[in-house]
Every structure is written in C-alpha cells, then in structure tokens.
Image: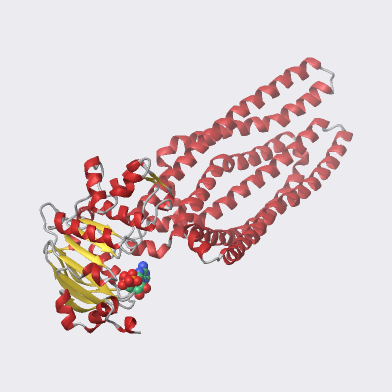
Amino acid sequence: MKSLQKLLQYLKPYTLFAILAPLLMCIEVAMDLLQPTIMQHIIDNGIAQSDNAYVIQMGLLMLVTAFVGLIGGAGCTVYSSKAAVNFAADIRRDVFRKTQQFSSRNTDTYGAGKLITIVTNDVTSVQQALMMTLRVFVRGPLLFIGSVIIVWVTARELFPVLLVTIPILMAFIYFFSSKTGKLFVKVQKAMDKVNTKLQETFSGIRVIKAFNRKNYEMDSFKDVNDTLTKRNMAAEQVILSLMPVMLFVVNVGVVFGMWMGAIKVDEGTMQVGVILAFINYLNIIMNGLISSSHVLMQITRSFTSANRIQQVLETVVDIQEPVNPIHTSDIKGSVEFDQVNFSYSKNGEYVLKNISFYAGAGDTIGIIGSTGSGKSTLVKLISRLYDPDTGTIRISGKDLKDYSLEELRTLIGFVPQKATLFSGTIEENLSYGKENANPDEMELAARSAAAYEFIERLDKGFNHELMQGATNLSGGQKQRLSMARAFIRHPKILVFDDSTSAVDALSEAAIQKTLRDHYGETTVFIISSKVSSIMDADQILVIDDGMIEAAGTHEELLQTSQVYRDIYETQSGKGVLSDE
Ligand SMILES: Nc1ncnc2c1ncn2[C@@H]1O[C@H](COP(=O)(O)OP(=O)(O)OP(=O)(O)O)[C@@H](O)[C@H]1O
C-alpha cells in the first residue's frame, strides 16, 4: 500500500490528465443515469398518452444524451491512458536507470529473470491499476450512488428492494475480492518463475541443443507453465463466478420489484415506466458494484508489483561514488593491491585472501592458477565491479574508491572471459569502447586485435550487422572484436580475462607484439591458463585457492614455485600428463 502511494509521485507531471479523465467520466455517468428516466417519461407520458410528438422529442433527447455520454467516455479513455501509460513509462525508465547503477553484487541479488518481470509485468500491473482507477473507480461508485438517489426520488415505494439486494451484493463482492487478493499474489510468483525460465532458456538455447536437453527443458517449462495456468485459472474462476451470482441476486430483486410495482400500478399509485426504469437502475447498480470490485481487485494485485518496483528503486547501491572524487587526468596506470580480502556474500568465505602485489605503470602482469582460484574476481576488483571487504587497492598511488567511477572505468579496457557484444553494426560495437571514434581509430583498434582482416572480408565491413549475442560471428571473431573494443579507448590499464582462448596462436602472437610495440605505457593484466601467453610478463602471479601462491618472472617462478613448474612442464610436454 505504502509502495503504491510512493509510486504515485510519478503521476505528478500528468496531474492534469489524471483530473480531466474522471471529470469526463462524470459526464458519461450523468448521461447514463439520465437514460432510464427519459425512457420512463417516453413510456408514461408519450406512449401511454399516445403523444407522438413527445415521444420523438424525448427520443431525440435520448440520442443527444447518448452522444454527450460518448464524448465524455472517449475523452476519459484518451486522458486516462495518457496519464497511466506515461506514468508507467517514467517508472520503467527509473527502474531501468537504477539497474544500470547497480553494482554487480546488487544485480546478483535479484537475478536477470526477476528484474525483467519487474520492468515488464509489474510496471504493467500498476499501469492497469491506475488506468482502471481513473476510468472505472469514478464510474462505478457514481453510477451506484446516482442510481440509488434516483430510485429514492422517483420510485421510493420500490426502495425497500434496494435495501435488501445491495447489502447482499456487497457481501458477495467482499467474499470474492478477499479470495482473489491472495490468489493474485500466487499468480505473480508463478509468473516470475515462467519469466526466469524463459530468460534462461533463450540465452542458453545453443547449449540446450548441443546437450540435447530439449525434452528436459520442455518438461521443466511445462511444470512452471502448468503452475501458472492453474493459479490463473483459479483466480479467473473466482472473478468470473462473481457475475452469475450477482445476476441471480439482481434477478430476484427484479422479480420482487415487479411484484411490488404491479400492486402499486393496480392501486393506481405508480406508472409502468417507473417499474422499467427501476429495473434498469438495479442493473446499473449491479454493474457499478461489479466494476468497482474489479478495480479494487486490480489495485490489490498491483500492491505486490508496487512493492517489488519500490524495492528496486530503493536498493542501496553498494558501490558508491566518492563525495569529492579525484580526477584521473595525467595519472599513470600503476596498480597496487594491499592485503585485499574479498567474498561475494556478506560474511561468506573469502574468495580472495590477503592479496598484495604491485604492478608498475606499463608493466605486464600475467595471472595463472587453477579453475575457480579467484583470477577473474581479482581483476573485477580493479574496475570496482565489487569492492574489497578489507584492504586497499590503489591506482597511481590513490585509493580506487577516491576516483570518480566513470573516469576510473574509462581508464580501463576490459576484455571479459565471455565476449559480450550487442546487436548492431561492428562500428557501433567498437564505439562502445570510445564514443565518436573515427574510422582511422576503428581500423587501428581492429588491426591491434587481429580483427581487421576478417572485418574487411565481410560484405559491409565495419557496417556488418551483428545479431543478438553476435551469433553470426565465430567465437574467435567475437573475442577479437571484444579486444578491439578495449584497444580503441587507449586505456591506462588493459585487462584480458582469459580472452584469447578462441584466438589462434599466430594471431595471439601478433596481438602480443602490438601490446609491446604500441601499448608500452599501458599496464596490462593477462589472465591465461596457457603459460605461453604470460611467460614474457614482467611479473606473474600464481593464484591458488584465492591466495598468491608465488609471484615473479617466468624464470624466477620456475625456481621458486612448484605449482608453476608443474603447469609449465605439463604444457611444454615435460610434465606428468605428457609422460603418460
Ligand atoms: N558472482 C558470483 N557470486 C558468487 N560466487 C562467485 C561469483 N563469481 C565467482 N564466484 C566464486 O568465486 C570463486 C572464484 O571465481 P573466479 O571466477 O574468480 O575464478 P577463476 O579463477 O577466474 O576461474 P576460471 O579460471 O574457471 O575462470 C569460485 O569459487 C566461484 O564459484
């Protein structure tokens, strides 16, 4: 409830629309309420008295009221949708903006599936609630109150019928609404699971095919889909069964109304038209109550959605900008880790333990170690994707946390383990590394990453369109583009996170030569499982179980580190594996 109230601040820019919509609805309601009374006059004063002129006159009045009602209704639809759709678009924009500020830890907490459900379903749910509120929430109660007043004024003898039917109708509405509230919370949760499943399946479709897991995925989708269907069915059945029950109560009311009316007509104290008008008003009362109850149900449903939206908007981003950031102009790219400890979850086990090393500006640092030892985590800390739990990381002698986040990340060219490219042209993907890069810079970056040759062979060269996830490129081509994207910004620090695994040996040698020849002042981190990729580094860190097991040059490590020697010997053909 509170969350929904907070979200209403998004309605402020559209206050005028939000006021106009119900006002125009009042016009429609007034016209709707006039119709039965006009009809009553046509019957009692026109048809009963054989006064054709009166019938035509009142008939025209009915048409005019219907037309005015139509204008009111259409205007209400236009303004209520303008208010609700814009209100939802602004919320969606802010939720998306917030997720862009999220640290990696914040994103991990939600998971992509849930975030997608929040930005789509939940925002649509509050949009629906607002739209219905602006349209129906005014219409329902006004029709109800207006009809009750008119019956009181024009057919007071039949009023006792309302006194009995209305409380019964309300009791049924209360009973059904309270049931649907809980059911919709369950529907929402089931929807979350369907969306998470869809998101996972679409992004992993190749793996599913390669492992022949189609049937398994079909079955597990069936499970979540069946749950959603069952819950939706239960909720819809409750909503839909309200209508026949209400109609039954109204019909009983109509019978009693006619019976009482017939007695009055017999006694000469009531005219037939009054009974017909009363029946119409009874139906209007029922419709007013039902539509109000539907709005209430939608509002209840949107509480959960509003909570989830507000939760994202209020998430405390744990990577914060410094209050007085230092600027990065003319800094060198030295990197120092000083007794750094890090865990992914609060109070969890450290994934990095007491890491200390110094990389001078322009140095090349090789990082090697077993799977899951913490290599990628170590370099993620340099870009402040996560902050260390304890210890300090310094760039150019200053604490990382003192730099402006944006400037810090501009200093660093990051080539991730899994090349992530976006749909769009190659040029657009490279511009991601440096906005407004000119064609010469593009070419140089592509050449540096050994990507130029294959780009040139493409029909449209740099204007070649990549599909979503760059599925129309090979693994090696993706890695080269991902490298070119990092090169193009001429960063102070370059990080290669095991990113040459799909690049052939010749191209890798060419890239290493480029690094030596053109990036002499850049501090380069190369994570690799191959000793050949890092053996020329100024310093190699051997990581084992989150700790630096040994550090030094290739020659030094061959003397001092058993782990390094084992890896080297295995890969150079002198080790245990090759002996077998
Ligand atoms: N986002 C995350 N949340 C929780 N744990 C994580 C996360 N990312 C990695 N880990 C865990 O942290 C540890 C170190 O992972 P990391 O990716 O740094 O290893 P790595 O040495 O780069 O491995 P590889 O050579 O296989 O890429 C692993 O135990 C991994 O399960």
Residue 345 visible? The answer is: no
Q: Image height check: is 202 above or below 48? A: below
Which residue, as the protein is rendered here, is positioned at the far right?
266
Give me the residue at 29% from left, 68% from top: 376
Q: Quadrant of residue 214?
A: bottom right
User: Residue 73 appears at what percent x and percent y?
Assistant: 59, 32
Give me the residue at 55% from left, 34% from top: 76
Residue 415 visible? The answer is: yes
Which residue, as the protein is rendered here, is positioned at the far top?
53
Left or right: where does residue 205 sit relative to residue 271?
Answer: left
Left or right: where does residue 340 sit relative to residue 294?
Answer: left
In this rendered view, identify the residue nearer to me: 171 or 90. 90
Q: Quadrant of residue 543?
A: bottom left
Q: Image height check: is 23 above or below 442? A: above
In this rendered view, identify the residue nearer to me: 223 or 313. 223
Left or right: where does residue 158 sit relative to residue 412?
Answer: right
User: Residue 412 appears at what percent x and percent y?
Assistant: 22, 57
Give the colour scheme shown: secondary structure
- Quarter of the image with the C terminus is bottom left
User: Residue 494 appears at what percent x and percent y?
Assistant: 21, 59
User: Residue 559 appears at what percent x and percent y?
Assistant: 16, 82
Give me the residue at 52% from left, 38% from top: 81
In this rendered view, identify the residue nearer to me: 568 or 413. 568
Q: Image height check: is 16 above or below 42? A: below
Left or right: where does residue 447 sit relative to residue 276?
Answer: left
Tally of numbered tags: 0
In this rendered view, identify the residue nearer to me: 531 or 542. 531
Which quadrant of the frame does ligand 1 lie within? Answer: bottom left
Q: Quadrant of residue 402?
A: bottom left
